[in-house]
Image: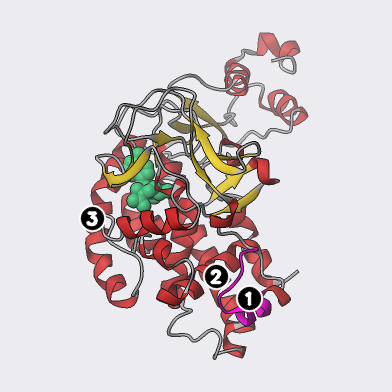
Amino acid sequence: MAEASRTFHATLFSLPTFSPRFHFKLSYSHSHPSLHLKRARSVQRSISETKTMSLNTTLPWGCDIDSLENAEALQNWLSDSGLPPQKVGINKVEMGKRGLVALKKINRGEKILFVPPSLLISSDSDWSSPVAGHVLKQQNVADLPLLATYLISEANLQKSSRWSNYISSLPREPYSLLHWTRSELDRYLKASQIRLRAIERIADITGTFDDLRRRIFSKHPHLFPKEVFNLVTFRWSFGILLSRLVYLYSMDGKVALVPWADMLNHSCEVETYLNYDKSSQAVVFTTDRAYQPGEQVFISYGKKSNAELLLSYGFVPKQGTNLNDSVELPLSLKISDKCYKQKLKALMKHGLSASSQCYPIQISGWPLELMAYAYLTVSPPSMSKQFEEV
Ligand SMILES: C[S@@+](CC[C@H](N)C(=O)[O-])C[C@H]1O[C@@H](n2cnc3c(N)ncnc32)[C@H](O)[C@@H]1O
């Protein structure tokens, strides 16, 4: 297998998408999450202010999502390209800066959007520069790095790419921990597992880019000039993919960018996800509530903790609004326990160890396994016959 595919294996398996089915192992903070996430929210602003400067000068594509720049052009292009008339439109919103807002009354249980497959961007989309696509596919580059390269290649073509209007509407700087420096991660995510996952993710992306550069880009500089295909543009394209890709369960698990649908913001209160609807042959979602004209329409990006949302999407929901928020509690067996050996034997029978077993605690509850571990650790010697049952 190509090195790039291997390098990206880890990241692919923690890929966030707008789907509950891509709900991987949760990562929780050891310190009080609301404390450092509050800091993270404030640093998000100061970091994006400083970073936008350098990225603005480097990236000649995308837009500033604080404004509605390019939104009208996107909507016109989408309707010319087969998107049917919509009950929602892009507007400025309180949660998520830009979002989709109801233009008419939308009923509960109604399907909306209807994005046709011809508007989906996936690893099998046609390249405007077919030779570049062919070279990458010949080298068995995995889907995610392939898509990241595709996005840069099309972005660089500007008006000559068929995706020009879409790319112009993407954030020039996607909110993402990928843009945080190591000292910012260490400072603001101190003692949080998210810090390690963000460091790993940045290392994965850097490693994947280095591998592509060494094996492919440097050998075909006319197809992949380094002024265009570099770490800055890769961080941008991965930031876009990680915060916007959609997992389409009914399309055999295809992972794609879905223009228009990716303007929907997340709400912890809704339980509805994007999917391909075979009967309408389009990407839709079914509302789980009614919306009045002017109200922002939301989907769910999955049942994720605040830390996970910060890691993949660069935002933290308002304090106390996310019932899926969780913190990981480490439990361990004291070596000074009078029954250490017997208890360890009981734990090992269940594939557990004496040191630091971590369990998620949510507002709504905690796993039975946590209770069992805790019962065992506090059981007195008189209960030694029941250790294994616990
Ligand atoms: C799929 S895009 C949604 C559209 C995005 N607002 C835009 O203007 O391009 C995901 C990004 O939207 C923002 N977002 C989504 N839901 C949010 C929320 N509840 N609060 C704050 N930001 C949110 C985050 O920046 C996230 O990375």
Task: Report the Cα–Cα distance between label 2 and label 1.
Answer: 8 Å
Q: Is disc 1 surrounded by few (<14), some (14 to 19) or many (20+) residues within 10 Å?
A: many
**Is 293 positioned to the left or the right of 199 in the image?**
left
Mark 3 or mark 2, earlier in chain: 3
Residue 98 image point, x, y percent: 30, 47
Identify the residue position indicated by label 3 in the image: 67
Q: Horizontal and vertical percent for residue 363?
A: 43, 22
Q: Residue at x 62, y 89 (%)?
A: 219
The stretch drawn in magenta includes residue 196: no
Residues marked 2 and 1 touching at CB (< 8 Å) = yes
Q: Is residue 271 above or below residue 95?
A: above
Q: Quadrant of residue 123?
A: bottom right
Q: Residue shown at 28%/55% (left/top)? A: 65
The foreground one among 336 and 171 is: 171
As helix, strand or loop, the secondary structure at mark 3 comes to loop
Q: Quadrant of the C terminus?
A: top right
Between the residue at mark 1 and the residue at mark 3, the CA separation in whole angstroms equals: 33 Å
Looking at the rendering, the stretch of residues picked out in magenta corresponds to 124-136
Which quarter of the rendered picture does the N terminus lie within? bottom right
How are the colours assigned in the image?
A: secondary structure
Q: Which residue is denoted by mark 2 in the rendering?
A: 150
Q: Specify the quadrant of the image occupied by residue 376.
A: top right
34 over 385 or under it: above or below: below
Label 1, on which residue? 133
**Residue at image location 61% in from the left, 55% down from the top:** 12
Viewer-closest of 309 and 335:
309
